[in-house]
Image: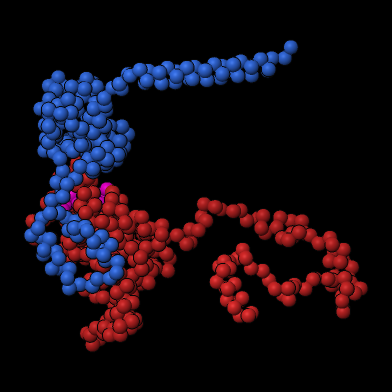
Amino acid sequence: MGIEKALRLVKDLPRVALNNIKNSPMDQKKPHNLRRGWGKNKTHGRGHKGQGQRMTLPKLGFETGHKPFYLRVPQEYYYEGHHLKRQYPPLSLLRLQRMIDMGCLDPNEVIDISSICMTGHYHLHVDRRHYGINLTEEGAEKFSTPICIEVQWASEMTIATIERLGGVIMTRFYDPLSLIALQDPETYFKTGKPIPKCKLPPTDAVEYYSDPKFRGYLADPEKIAEERVALSQKYGYDLPDLSESDKLSLLLKRKDPRQIFFGLHPGWIVNLTEKKILKPKAEYLQEYYHS
Amino acid sequence: MALRRFRSCFTKLQVVANYHSFVRLCSSTYKSKYSIENIYPNSDPNFLRKVEFKQTYNNDTEEEFTGYIPLDDISIKAVRGSGPGGQNVNKVSSKVEVRFHVESATWIPEWIKKNLIENEKGRITKDGDLVVTSEKTRTQMLNQADCLDKVREMIYNSAKKPVEMTEEYKKVVAKRLAKANMERLQRKRADSLKKKNRRSE
């Protein structure tokens, strides 16, 4: 009889939520009473004489009259959160042209954050919240090589200078663990860790990387094509027709959003001494690295 | 901002031969759940394809200006700028001059040209060339962009059609004027009261 009633209640009553539950009567809080009880007589937990017993203790932070620490140091809201913000150390187009002219970078290969870090002329410190390269406009007038480049931040004028010469620029996000692998691949491979799969950008960066105006890697390719023409009209240059160029395969080369190195998949372990690549066979790993 | 209209008139033109080679290139590489083909399944991944857009206008109907300026039909000159700056301003040609003949320009719709000549009388030479200069920034590229932006704005302003003065609109205008006048009188009364209260007698 009781079981049937209970089952009917379970069926009819609403879902358990925060607005229809309460503590059991057995679960009562003990009242805090310092006036009565064993050992709580006489001074009632307040000790002998002084400010402690007489309720005249000074406020928290008081330092007996001189200016206390919390009032001595001024608040600087200008720098609030600066130690947590993403930083993109700049690399000017002038420096980039110089690196190409000196032979440090090959314009016939895709210029990646790896290739720039390995020239030795640009340094990235991942522990200092450096998230990649910011390609600046300094030297835009002197830039004269068609290149295929992948950076983390680029302004409109930088994009215009590269595209007017018949090059391709793409902005791409890398998370810090991937950057550790990218800035010095040799050291990373020697650690024996598998190639990490790159994480997607954080919420405040997703808009930038899905914007075709900044040639984001998560943007719609059709809209990127339209934006290329619109930019050429804005800055007043003839957009070179790259569909007939022999460099087309190089210019269209793109990494997958989860991929870090060209030709290498996340999850692989690269053995430099034996010149071998170890690939994961297990299905759960394959699923993880393809998700 | 002046390119808003231009962006909306794009049409697709697929370059088929290079698309196939592009697909062949990508088939043997790594593909995750977030690859571009999965995020945008209906988009052409060849972002270097040629995009066609409207370049000529039909002069029978009053077609709007799209914002497209063919760079072969205008002359762009880089000139040395003015003002302070020492050696830099003396040597670097960062001022940009854009010049074109208005009457013979095929890229402006005919019905806009008349208004353009009237509105920009000060910028048009005796030969009928519209001259626009810019030395707003320190770089030639940005000044060139500014010049072209100015040209587009001039054409858009010349293309504005006058407001139709229907009976309803006349009433709306009269109502607005009456309200503005009432507010002006209120402010005047308030100011007068303020000054009166300051006087001590």
Q: Nearer the viewer, residue A240 or A222?
A: A222
Q: Which residues are magenta?
A: A157-166
Judging by colour alone, the chain drawn in red in this rendered image is: A
Q: Main secondary structure of the magenta part?
A: helix
Q: At 36% across and 21% down in the image, what residue appears? A: B169
Extreme-top residue of the structure: B201
From this view, report whether residue A263 is shown above or below residue B198.
Answer: below
Q: Nearer the viewer, residue B112 or B40?
A: B40
Extreme-bottom residue of the structure: A274
From this view, report whether residue A179 is shown above or below residue B181.
Answer: below
Coloration mode = by chain
Percent coordinates x, y for residue A238 in the rendering: 14, 45
From this view, report whether residue A132 is shown above or below residue B148.
Answer: below
From this view, report whether residue A8 is shown above or below residue B141.
Answer: below
The quadrant of the image that shows the N terminus of chain A is bottom right
Q: How many marks?
A: 0
Task: Name the image quarter holding residue A99.
Answer: bottom left
Res A195 seen here: no
Judging by colour alone, the chain drawn in blue in this rendered image is: B
The quadrant of the image that shows the C terminus of chain A is bottom left
Percent coordinates x, y for residue A223 in the rendering: 24, 52
Extreme-front residue of the structure: A1
Residue B16 relative to residue B118: left or right: left
Percent coordinates x, y for residue A131 in the rendering: 37, 63
Q: Nearer the viewer, residue B30 or B178?
A: B178
Extreme-right residue of the structure: A42
Task: Name the image quarter holding residue A23.
Answer: bottom right
Please tell me whether residue A220 belongs to the stretch shown in magenta.
no
Residue B146 relative to residue B126: left or right: right
Res B28 seen here: yes
Q: At 23% across and 72% down in the image, what residue appears? A: B30
